[in-house]
Image (spheres, coloured by chain):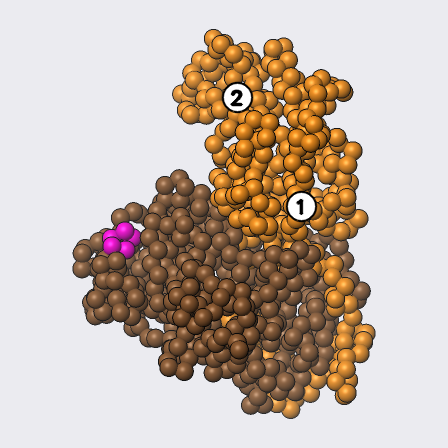
Amino acid sequence: MADTFLLNGKETPFKAGQMILEAAKGGGIEIPTLCYLKGSTPTGACRVCCVEVKGARSLVAACSTPVSPGMEVSTDSEIVHRARKLNVELLLSSGKHSCIACEANGNCRLQDLAYFYKITDLKFKEKEISDIPPTEDENPFIIRDFSRCILCGKCVQACNEVVVNRAISQGYRGKNSKIVTGGDSPYNDSECVFCGQCVQVCPVGALTEKKAKGLGRPWETQKIRTTCPYCGVGCQQLLHVKDGKIIKVTAVEDAQPNQGRLCVKGRFAYDFIYSEERLKTPLIREKNGEFREASWDEALDLVANKFKEIIKKDGPDAIAGVSCARSINEDSYQMQKLFRAVIGTNNIDHCART
Amino acid sequence: MTNSFADYAKAKLFILIGTNMTEAHPVASTFVKDAALNGAKLIVIDPRRTDLVDFADMHVQLKVGSDVALINALMNVLITENLYDKKYVESCTEGFEELKKKVMEYTPEKAAPISGIPADTIRELARKMASIKPAMLMYTLGITEHICGVNNVMSCANLQMLLGNVGVECGGVNPQRGQNNVQGACDMGALPNVFPGYQQVANADARAKFEKAWNVKSLPDKPGMMMPTMMKNLTTGKVKAFYVFGENLANTEPDIKHVEHELQSAEFLVCQDIFPTETTRFAHVILPAAAWSEDDGTFASSERRVNRVRKVSVPPGDAKPNWWIFKELAKKMGHEWTSNSAQEIWDNELSVLAPSMAGIKYSRLEGDGLQWPCPTADHPGTPTLHKDGKFTRGLGMLKAIDYIPPAEVPDKEYPFVLSTGRRLYHYHTRTQTGRCAGINDLLGEETADISPADATAKGIVDGEKILVKSRRGKVEVKARVTDQVPEGLVWMAFHFRETCANWLTNPVYDPTTQTAEYKACAVEIEKLK
């Protein structure tokens, strides 16, 4: 029999070592959190996940408090909500959290909580702009807007415990606290390899994709799952598409094999398809060596006739082809079928060997 | 891969040989790092001090191309010190006596001068490998891109079978494929000897099956040419027409000068691509194709996982899906093919014809895809091959293998070894990454990576342009002085045209696979006046 605890009065099973946050999720209660990152050491930084535990002297952080058998936990009491609201109000005054121009508008956990708690005015004095480090975007991909940073540390966890690139950490103390690279240099002068995992996990608008800036709101985009076109790992991506155009790429959470992770190419190297240099029409080389545009009919007739002529004169084995290891399976299937069934040769290969 | 990426985070011991995962397979490397932080042991066998060495218990910095000698010596120690898995070897493998006889010739003392690894370190390494079960072995092109690539691969398999590590979760022999669909192109039969699903063209029953399905009287029974042979025969006239689909051979093949001569010699060259490339310059006809995200379809990843790829927009101008181009060309040559989408091709043809993928249909690929073999509609797919040491061929074959040096070794005239590969920020010849905003800012040019010792000896400072030359060609390139590279080694990639390593590489091939020896040739470096 599994151990149980009382979650809002209801007997709920939990696994040994589980924190309240996870066990409550198992019991169907989603406790709000800003800093919890699955699979990483809980930090208890945001205090938004506070819950009431009978017998405890104060509210506890659900993300970092282990459940014990028989523990009585309230996630929905007045005192809990009052404390969470207060924490949200404190976070809202920790920077300049205006939503109008924020890239995270519509995809922001802090905004969600402010909305839930019907917070319309700032209760505390906002941090002075002079006390906020300037936005850093010297690199091509990631904007670090410290005025929106709530110091939850999720990016630090992701960088150090998930992708283990060890480029960023919590820096300075007190009101000077800041997420920093080694030596507090810009990302592009640091150990950062631009995997963008920090952006993926940021619950607010502190870390956003530079290339996506101003191109579309979360509710305006379709999210289409696909497979990365680069290496052979097969990472699962979500293409954020607006008006038929990819404006951003994120990783699919909890998907095999990448579990919400991508690399610099998977996350940021998608826009080659929009290059003006794309081939847009069949081309035929003239006698003078120049290429001229042609219709599909003309180009394919030329290829078919030339192939037929060579087959007749030199036999099918005088034709050879290599397929593409970048394109879809079905394209390779078709090409080998063309060579074997139509041309009549097994001279079909691809770059696997070179 | 015999195993799955999901094993990485759970493995207890990794043997990485000839793989620079943080650059070539970055996401997979994160799971190795996670495991290492959680206490897994990591052995990195590589001539370079790659980034994963930071997480390693042992870095064995072998000399380029000495893998067989090192692995034979490791097996020598495993057998001599009785550290191998006797039960596994007896019940699951054959060829042990021949292997033993061979590896007994390779004492650690014999392998030491060949590999550059002291005999005692080889012993320590062997003991470490046997200390935890199972161990997961991963390799990439550091193993295959040698004239003895097949021998290197078989040596990895020998080692893992001797350790009893094949057929178990978190074990196996795991080649991580370089391209998104290089696995799939093999699976689909874009190989000269097999139909889709690895059915031999030489097998009359297989031919009969495909003849019926494709509605043709006969199919050729003789395996065709491999790519290097095709290209060589462009100059002999044996091959008149060459059809290049989505490859930039003029930059990716060894010895560019010679490759371009071959392409130039084609009587008729068809290129089907998404961009003009160095290769399309030689074409007689260029066919514009749909790119990733402009067509629905599937890729197969290294772990044999068939995943969906989805369309979000139409190709530009008159560009067309590749499968459509082949279908139309077939039509012009008198063959009517019925399948009219990637899904119809997969569901109605491929999965019907390839038994190992018979259970994979598009309707089953909505989530995380499926790993072949997946023979039936209710089969869950296969995360681990050769389960419990039961091999596809019955018993695992242990092979006695001899070390041979690279085809071109350093001499007085060309005293450095050049080894090549790819870097994190770019992909191959940059046809794609070179056209993505921002990527060139992170890596804008090629470098020749050299050791601090060699830099000092030659009076070269970091960032200065130097000359790198081989018997094939020469390039002027910026020197990057780094302790990643040992003395005597020059390391370069093939991302940038003017400074591409393939102006220098040696067009010599493994006799079985015709894989080129990109990892080893001899060069000289010179300070520019």
Give the distance between the C-alpha atoms of the residues marked 2 and 1, in whole angstroms.
35 Å
Q: Residue at x 77, y 45 (%)?
A: A215
Above or below, comparing residue B445 to residue A1 in the picture: below
Residue picked out by circle 2: A62
Position of B435 with respect to B38 (left or right) is right
- Secondary structure, magenta segment, majority class: helix
Q: Which chain is orange?
A: A
Q: State the brown chain.
A: B
Q: Position of residue A11 (x, y in %)?
A: 50, 15
In-image side of A125 versus B229 (left or right): right
Left or right: A278, with B429 as reference point = right
Q: Camera-side residue: A23 or B275?
A: B275
Report the magenta residues as a range.
B124-129
Depth check: give the residue in front, A127 or B284. A127
**Subunit of label 1:** A
What residue appears at the point 64 percent right and 71 percent down from the top-left corner?
B245
Local secondary structure at mark 1: loop
Dot 1 corresponds to which residue? A137
Task: Tell me if label 2 and label 1 are in contact, CB under 8 Å.
Answer: no
Q: Residue shown at 42%/60% (left/top)?
A: B483
Q: Chain of mark 2?
A: A
- Mark 1, Cα crowd under 10 Å, few <14 / some 14-19 / many 20+, is some
The magenta stretch spans residue A68? no
Residue B124, above or below A106: below
Give the answer, above or below, for where A144 lies relative to B329: above
Where on the picture, by quarter, is residue B237?
A: bottom right
Q: Can you tell which of label 2 and label 1 is closer to the viewer?
A: 1
Amino acid at dot 1: Asp
Amino acid bearing label 2: Ala
What residue appears at the point 77 percent right and 51 percent down from the top-left corner?
Answer: A244
